[in-house]
Every structure is written in structure tokens, then in C-alpha cells.
């Protein structure tokens, strides 16, 4: 039996996209089993929405802050107000938010180069950091290593948790920064929740109070009850074409945290002396404010979408991480296809369901910054925006697809149905 409206949708998806009745029924049944989980996600979004709303009001956001600026951008009120609102929303003392930060990697890189000095060491305690960060740390020219800033990584325990004891014993006098990556990246582990990050920071800080505790917050914003600065992190960074931009920000990144550290980052990201006094953006800031306002809702849509995918693909016999009933720390979903054909069919199914470039057939390619060939579905309004429904997977065992985002749950539902149909057809 289908719910009201579902019969029409089933007919439509069958005619337009060849989704069979049985695949549709599978997805609809999976959705019904998730009713309680979805209620929790919606309830959390409401709390975040209230906090964001109050932050806008406390900061006195006004329509004049949407105006763009030119040249040096002296006295650009929108730029400064956006930083203020972000700091407020994230429970941080200060923030730099800018469309002039080109990506999440750029934001994190600015934070690292801003606060670390030659002779310092960065210790990543969540295993090896995300692929695009590796050249920043240990690449050649211009990397941290090139400036005599060393870096190390503490592997995670077999169950995917942080090895606090091993981290303790690895910290040396020159270890200036403890770095934690919240999201999964291309690792096969669940994302860390803010609560787990808090526990690690609290325990390490007892003996190492002078270290800077930094969190790569990519994909994590508005997923848990609090953001990392409210849980002990000194500094966080992330991308505006992921969660925090709410799907509207066309580009940009942010760094937030302790005032003294954000000031250091300011001197690096602009230039010493002019630091945070300059920086114009002619198109204006409305999309950034409006995107932040929408972000709690959009993140909830994405969470429901990936949870549905977990439920459906687990039901089809694939290993998924996290499982549909797990507490999530980010908006990503890993599905292990264990087979390049099924992975390819899945990614092509997601692309087929995209609002943009749906006619493009994805092929694996050598993406800059990544070690293996990667196949990706990225039919997005904003290029590479992974708060939009996107999937990618490196062509290496276990042939895992990394699915993320979804601007609307409705779209995610349709995409799951199409991708499931295509994966089943590939077997
Ligand atoms: C997306 C992401 C980044 C930054 O990537 P960009 O593509 O440069 O925005 C960094 N770390 C993690 C874990 C990420 O998911």
C-alpha cells in the first residue's frame, strides 16, 4: 500500500526514469521505518533555527549589510557583520568569514599558517587528515613542512575511536596544535560527534593546556546540538559550499574561535597591518546571510536524505557507515559497494537525478589533490557544492561511495530511488 501522493509519484518515476514499482516500494517502506529518526532531526533543526534567528537579531542584521563593496572594501559593514553573526552562531569569540576564502582547504590552510610557526608541530589525532590537507602539511613547495612546521598523525583505534593514550604519549614540547577532523573524509569510519571531540579535547587539555585544539568542522555544522567552540575547540574552519552556506552561498570559507587566534589568521589571510580591515565583494552578502539562516533546515534535509540512503542500501545488502539508526556527526554517508561496477552505477544514478548536468555521464578521473582516480556525481547549482546531493568514490577497494547533502529531502528521496534502481540493474 502506498501513502497519499506516493501512487502518483511512483507512476511518474516509473515513466520518467524507469524506477520499477518494487524499487519504489522498497524506498517508501524504508522511509516509513525512519519516522522517529526524522522527527529527531527536525526537532534539532528547530533548536538550531531558533539560535540562528536569535544570533541575527542580537547582531542587528539589517538590509544594508547585504550591499557589496569595491576596491579595498574599507568600512564594508556587510563583511564585518557576517563575521560577527558567524561568531555568535558558533559560540566563538571571533570569526573570519569571506567569499574570498576559496574552499574549505583554503580556510583550514589559512588557519594553520596563521597560528603555527617554524619549529612547531601539528599533531592530527583523528588519523591521517583529509586528502586535500596532505599537500598542505607535507607537500613540497609552500607546505607547512617547507616552513619547518612538522606534522604527525595518531591512528584511530580499530573501532574508529580516538586513541587518547597514544595521543598523550605522542605530544612533545613543540606540539603546538592538536588537530581533529570531524568528518569522515575518504576514511572508513563514522564522523565524530561534538560530544566525542569534546571528550578528547577535555582529556588532553588537562595535561596540555597550552596546545591549540583545532577542529576541521567541514560537513559538521548544525548536525549535533552544539558546535565545537562551545565544546572546547580553540579554532574551527569550514567551507561555505557545505553546511554553513545553506546551499545559497556561492563560494567562501570561515575560520572561527578564540579572538587571539582569529587575529593571527587575519594577518595571514589578508596581509599583516591591513589584516581584517580590507576585502571587498561586489555582488554583496545577501546569499551568505540568507544561506546561514537556511542552513539548519537544509542540513536537516541532507541528514534525512543520507539516512534514507543508509536504510535503503543496507536493506539491499550493502554495508553502510553510519547505519540509519546511528548518532551522526556529519552529513555524509558511506556505502561500500565492493565492486567498481556497482559503485559506478550508483554514482551515475545520483547524477541522473541531478537538477543540473543530468545528461552528463560521470567517469573516473584524476582529481587535483586526490591520490586515486575519483568518480563523482556533481550536478550542482554551485560547482562542487556538497551540501547539494552529490556522491563520489575513489576507484580503489572497497569501492566505497561517499554520499552527501541534499538541498531538499524530496530530491534526496527521488535520487535514492533512481540510484537504487541503477545499482540493482548493474548486478
Ligand atoms: C570538504 C572537506 C575539506 C575541505 O575541502 P574543500 O573541497 O577544499 O572545501 C576538508 N576536510 C574535510 C573533512 C572535508 O570534508
Image (tube, helix red, strand yellow):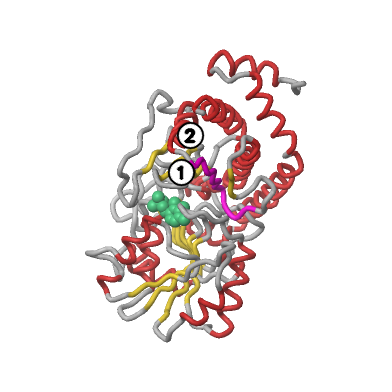
Decide which of tag 1 and tag 2 comes sooner along the chain.
2
Q: Quadrant of residue 367?
A: top left
Compared to residue 103, the image places residue 392 above or below, namely above
- Counting labels gives 2
- Marks 1 and 2, Cα distance to the nearest angstrom? 9 Å
Given contact means CB atoms under 8 Å apart, are the residues at marks 1 and 2 in contact?
Answer: yes
Residue under circle 1?
399
Q: Quadrant of residue 89?
A: bottom right
Compared to residue 4, the image places residue 79 above or below, namely below
Q: Is residue 265 left or right of residue 328?
A: left
**Residue 29 in view in this figure:** yes
Compared to residue 243, the image places residue 91 above or below, namely below
Local SS, label 2: helix
**Residue 228 percent across, percent down from the top left:** 57, 64
Q: Is residue 299 left or right of residue 74?
A: right
Local SS, label 1: loop
Query: For the point 63% across and 40% down, which residue is it?
Result: 314
Between residue 291 and residue 283, name the one nearer to us.
291
Residue under circle 2?
342
The magenta stretch spans which residues? 328-338
**Residue 278 percent across, percent down from the top left:** 33, 59
Amino acid at each position: 500500500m502506498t501513502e497519499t501522493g506516493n501512487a502518483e509519484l511512483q507512476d511518474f518515476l516509473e515513466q520518467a526514469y524507469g524506477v520499477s514499482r518494487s524499487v519504489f516500494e522498497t524506498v517508501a517502506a524504508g522511509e516509513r521505518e525512519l519516522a522517529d529518526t526524522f522527527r529527531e532531526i527536525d526537532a534539532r533543526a528547530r533548536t538550531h533555527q531558533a539560535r540562528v534567528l536569535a544570533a541575527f537579531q542580537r547582531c542587528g542584521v539589517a538590509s544594508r549589510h547585504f550591499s557589496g563593496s569595491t576596491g579595498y572594501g574599507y568600512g564594508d559593514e556587510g563583511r564585518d557583520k557576517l563575521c560577527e553573526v558567524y561568531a555568535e552562531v558558533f559560540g566563538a569569540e571571533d570569526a573570519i568569514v569571506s567569499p574570498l576564502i576559496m574552499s574549505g582547504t583554503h580556510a583550514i590552510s589559512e588557519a594553520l599558517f596563521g597560528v603555527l610557526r617554524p619549529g612547531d608541530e601539528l599533531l592530527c589525532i583523528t588519523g591521517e587528515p583529509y586528502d586535500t590537507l596532505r599537500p598542505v602539511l607535507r607537500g613540497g613547495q609552500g607546505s607547512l613542512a617547507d616552513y619547518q612546521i612538522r606534522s604527525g598523525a595518531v591512528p584511530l583505534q580499530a573501532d574508529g575511536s580516538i586513541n587518547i593514550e597514544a595521543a598523550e604519549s605522542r605530544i612533545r614540547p613543540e606540539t603546538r596544535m592538536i588537530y581533529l577532523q570531524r568528518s569522515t573524509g575518504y576514511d572508513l569510519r563514522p564522523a565524530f560527534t561534538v560530544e566525542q571531540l569534546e571528550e578528547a579535547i577535555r582529556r588532553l587539555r588537562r595535561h596540555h593546556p597550552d596546545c591549540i585544539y583545532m577542529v576541521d568542522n567541514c560537513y559538521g555544522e548544525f548536525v549535533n546540538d552544539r558546535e565545537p567552540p562551545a565544546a572546547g575547540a580553540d579554532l574551527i574552519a569550514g567551507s561555505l559550499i557545505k553546511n554553513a552556506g545553506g546551499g545559497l552561498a556561492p563560494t567562501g570559507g570561515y575560520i572561527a574561535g578564540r579572538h587571539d587566534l582569529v587575529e593571527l589568521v587575519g594577518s595571514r589571510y589578508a596581509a599583516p597591518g591591513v589584516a581584517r580591515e580590507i576585502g571587498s565583494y561586489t555582488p554583496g552578502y545577501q546569499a551568505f546571510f540568507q544561506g546561514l539562516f537556511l542552513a539548519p533546515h537544509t542540513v536537516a534535509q541532507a541528514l534525512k536524505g543520507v539516512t534514507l540512503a543508509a536504510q535503503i542500501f543496507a536493506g539491499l545488502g550493502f554495508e553502510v557507515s553510519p547505519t540509519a539508526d546511528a548518532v551522526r556527526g556529519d552529513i555524509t554517508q558511506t556505502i561500500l559497494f565492493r565492486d567498481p561496477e556497482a559503485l559506478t552505477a550508483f554514482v551515475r544514478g545520483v547524477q541522473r537525478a541531478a537538477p543540473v548536468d543530468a545528461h552528463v555521464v560521470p567517469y573516473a578521473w584524476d582529481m587535483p589533490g586526490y591520490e586515486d582516480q575519483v568518480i563523482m556525481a556533481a550536478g550542482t547549482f554551485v560547482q562542487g557544492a556538497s551540501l547539494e546531493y552529490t556522491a563520489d568514490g575513489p576507484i580503489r577497494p572497497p569501492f566505497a561511495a561517499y554520499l552527501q547533502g541534499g538541498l531538499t529531502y524530496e530530491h534526496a528521496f527521488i535520487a535514492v530511488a533512481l540510484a537504487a534502481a541503477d545499482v540493482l540493474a548493474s548486478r
